Structure formats: C-alpha cells, structure tokens
Image (cartoon, rainbow, N blue to C red):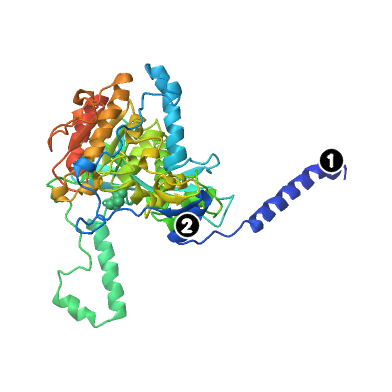
Amino acid sequence: MRFLLRRLPVVLILAGTQLLLAQQESSAPPAVNFTAEQDQQNMMEQLGIKALRPGPSGNENAPNHANYEESKANPYPHVPDPLTLNDGEKVTTAQMWWEKRRPEIVEMYSKYVYGFVPRNVPKVKWTVRAVDREMIGFTPVIAKDLVGVVDNSSYPAISVKMHMTLVTPANAKSPVPVLIMFGPAGFPNPNEPRGDDLEQINDAMKKLLLQQDPSLAQVFANHPAWEPFNASPLFQVPQLNADGDPPNQWELAAAGWGFALFDPASVQADNGAGLTRGIIGLVNRGQPRTPEDWGALRAWAWGAGRALDYLETDPAVDAKHVGIDGVSRYGKAALVTMAFDPRFSMVLVGSSGKGGATLLRRNFGEAVESLTGGEYYWMAGNFMKYGASDASFGSMNPGDIPVDANELIALCAPRLTFISYGIPEKGDAKWLDHEGSFMATVDASRVFALLGTKGLESFGDYRTAKMPAVNEGPVGGELAWRQHDGGHTDAPNMKWFIQWANKSMGYTPQQ
Ligand code: GCU
C-alpha cells in the first residue's frame, strides 16, 4: 500500500500523458486533399496575390514562346553581388564570407526562394533491407537496399519511407568515395540463381506444371533440353547510351567509386497536390504550407542529407568524399543539396536551368514565371511573389529577387562543384539557358578565389565572358564547367567528373 501511495503521483502523471497523446492523436486534423491548383490558389491567397504572369511556352512556334534572343536576355543590368553584405560593406576576407555573407545568402535563399527546412523535422531510422553481391559492368560490387523510416508519431496518418540503394566495389581495400544520384532506387543488377540453384528451381517448376496438367509429360519428353528459366549472360557487353557513353554506374564502379541511388519521390512527391503529404505534409500534420515553408527541391535536398547521415555510419564509405548528382529538376536539387549542406564534398549539376545554376534574372527559355506557375511547388510559396502581376503589394518581377544563381553556386565554395550541360541539337533544350548558367558560374568564381580555390575567374566579367567550346575542359578548377556534345543527360561528362574529382581528392583506387 505504502509503495502504491508513493508511486501514485508518477502513475497519475503517466496516465495523464497517455491521455494527452491519445487526445492529440484523435484531434489531429485529417490531411488536406488539395489538387495542385487548389494548393497554389491557397498559397496565392496567403500572399495576397490575385494574378500571376503566365509562363512562356517551350514550343518555339507558339505565339507566347519563350525568348531566345540574346539581345533581349539581360533585362537587368546587374545580379546581386555575392561579395557585398546587405548593408553595403564589401566582403574582403574569407572570415567575412563565412561569418557574415554566407549566412545572409543562406537566409535569403531560404526565405525567398526554396523555403526553410522546419526546425522540428522528425528523426530518420535507416535499415538495411537486403544485401546482394552483383556485377556492375565488369566490377563485382556489394549492393545494399535501404529504407529510411521517418518517425511519424506526431502524425501517424502520413508515413515517409525513404528508399536508397548503396553500391560499393566488393574488392575495395579502403573506404571509397560515393556519388549519391537522385533517381529511382533498387538493386541495379540483381544476382540471379545459376547452376545447381537454377536447376532446383527448374525441377520444381516442371513438377508444378505437371501437377497442373499431367499431359505436359509428353511435351517435356518432346523437348528434353527445354527449361522454364534460363540464366542471363554472366557478363554484359558494355551498354553505350545514345551519346556513346557507358552508363554512369559502370564508369563509377570501374573507377573504384561507390554510388547510391536515392529516390526523391520517396521523400516528397513531384507535384503540388503532394505538398500536404510526404515529408513536407508530415511536418505540417497534413495541412498546407505557409509562405516560408520548404518546397520539393529543399525537401529532396533534405532527404539527400539524411542519406549522407547513413553513409557516415557505413564503413565501406569514405564519408568525407560524398558527392551529389542529378539532371534537370534533380540537377537543381543536387545544387540545392550542395549549397545548404556543407558535409557534401562535391556535386555534379546536370542540365539544371532556372531554379538551378541559371541566373533567375535572365530572360531566356524557362522563366521565373515557369517556376511560379506550374512548377511553383518546387519552391517556397514566397517565391510566387516574383511572378505576381496583381497583388496587395502591387506586382514584382525577377529583378526583385534578393539573390541569384551566382550566389547559390557561391554557397558551394570552396568545395568541388561541376556545372554540366549538353547541347540543344541533341536535346539539351535552349529552354535551359546554358549561357545564363555560364554567367552565374563565372561570377561565383570570385568567391572560390576568395576562399583560396579556383573557378572561372580567368574568364573575366560575367557579362562579357565567352563560353568555352563544346567538349572543351572541364575548364576552371574546384569550380568547373563543361558542356558536352550529348543530350539532356550528364553521362558524357561522368568520366570527366571522375577524373577531375580524383585529381583533386588525390584518389587512386587500390584494387
Ligand atoms: C521542365 C522544367 C525544367 C526541368 C525539366 C525536367 O523542362 O521546365 O525546370 O528541369 O522539366 O526536370 O525535366
């Protein structure tokens, strides 16, 4: 009795907490089910926007097609200066960059462009689901399929399970550099049953078939060499893509690198209707975003950061040399990842365009109005202001954005940053504005130089710098540029990326 009495307050408190949790759970509002249009409209109302300027058409024959005339491409005389503080003071030392200017740019890019990662994002628990020994081209590898489950005890109606597959060379003598690649995850080349194992499966299969239809005995007798299943050839001939290059995975494995396939869709859906689901929806307990909340690009980048958390615990991985790679919208996501998470030591930014490495102030191809229109969910809600034609604050245009892509690239300094494009003739559309990315890269070089590394500063002023020829380079240093002669892919630049990164890391695989 005395024991019980002494424990009573504790018991009561515990019971109370349980009750509170149960109440919270039952009072949790159901997740909002907006269409993308409704979600966008909701954000416009929050921002006081009545109308958005429509984005241009990508079809060059359409009357409202995007501008492709270089003479009209630079309506704003200057981009914001990465090396001037918001109060006008010039940044002259590395210390000023780290302590003052970089935090200013991070804050502005979060607030006005990609959104903030909320402070209360729940923890992720990674589990290895299965391990497979496979071949990637001619390289034996170990492939681990992983799931990263986000703690959803705050809102059990939404679950987020991130999917990643880590592939490392089986014969590596020491931890290897790893490139995380945005895209579908899963075992790249599952190890198939062969020899006795395959025979056992085929025997069982034939027995099953005979049970189903005993008259098959005659068919089997007529075709004694036939087996239900055959093994695929052990070695594949190199599969060259349309640009004549082996797949990225083959090149990385052959060079003694690891790679991780990381599925962005397992973090956040690639559409506006999904914003009340996925990691963004989980943190908001199924409710719509507020204007400074993260968009899909920042959420994908956050996911890549959690992938790196796992890689830091895996002894096969040299976690000091983990890179991030993506093409197109995932090229934007790769640049955002690198810019905000300083643990990433390198990035390959493939054909990223507006919202990636291309200057937002440029009027060429994809426009800010594309990013505030159908693509609004990649960005923070706040970003829509710059496409507003009629709003409580009047109207705004790209020249009002407090930051630009030269500063986004500068956030990657002094780390290894490779900006990659292909050519329009092969499908890397003019829409992407290669020139605008080159200008941003040239201007960002001043920050790399300030931090003691090298970019494209020898090209001079970004407004007059001449783009290098196709297939030249990589030009630059730690910040590098190369336009290959292939299409909307980074594959033709992968070998250049590997050589360039190896040189800088001093990496020679000991196999
Ligand atoms: C569209 C979009 C681009 C994007 C691309 C893609 O072209 O406008 O921003 O990069 O799709 O991801 O395929």
201 w.r.t. 417: above or below: below
- How many residues crowd mark 1 within 10 Å: few (<14), some (14–19), many (20+)? few
In the image, residue 364 lies at what x, y percent? Answer: 25, 45
The amino acid sitting under disc 2 is Gln
Q: Which mark is residue 140?
A: none
Residue 130 relative to residue 245: left or right: right
In the image, residue 370 lies at what x, y percent? Answer: 34, 51
Q: Which structural element holds mark 2?
A: helix
Tally of marks:
2
Q: Nearer the viewer, mark 2 or mark 1?
A: 2
Query: As rendered, which of 429 and 139 lies closer to the eye?
Result: 429
Whether residue 262 appears in this view of the structure is: no
In the image, residue 51 lies at what x, y percent? Answer: 43, 55
Q: Which structural element holds mark 1?
A: helix
Alpha carbon of mark 2 to alpha carbon of mark 1: how far? 57 Å
Query: As rendered, which of 176 and 487 lies closer to the eye?
Result: 487
288 w.r.t. 221: above or below: above
The outermost residue toward the bottom is 215
Q: Residue at x 39, y 30 (%)?
A: 342
**Labels 2 and 1: the sequence-earlier one:** 1
Residue 166 relative to residue 494: left or right: right
Residue 268 relative to residue 506: left or right: right
User: Splitting the image into 4 quarters, where does residue 439 fall?
Assistant: top left
Residue placed under numbered mark 2 in the picture = 41
Residue placed under numbered mark 1 in the picture = 6
In the image, residue 205 lies at what x, y percent? Answer: 28, 69
Whether residue 496 appears in this view of the structure is: yes
The amino acid sitting under disc 1 is Arg
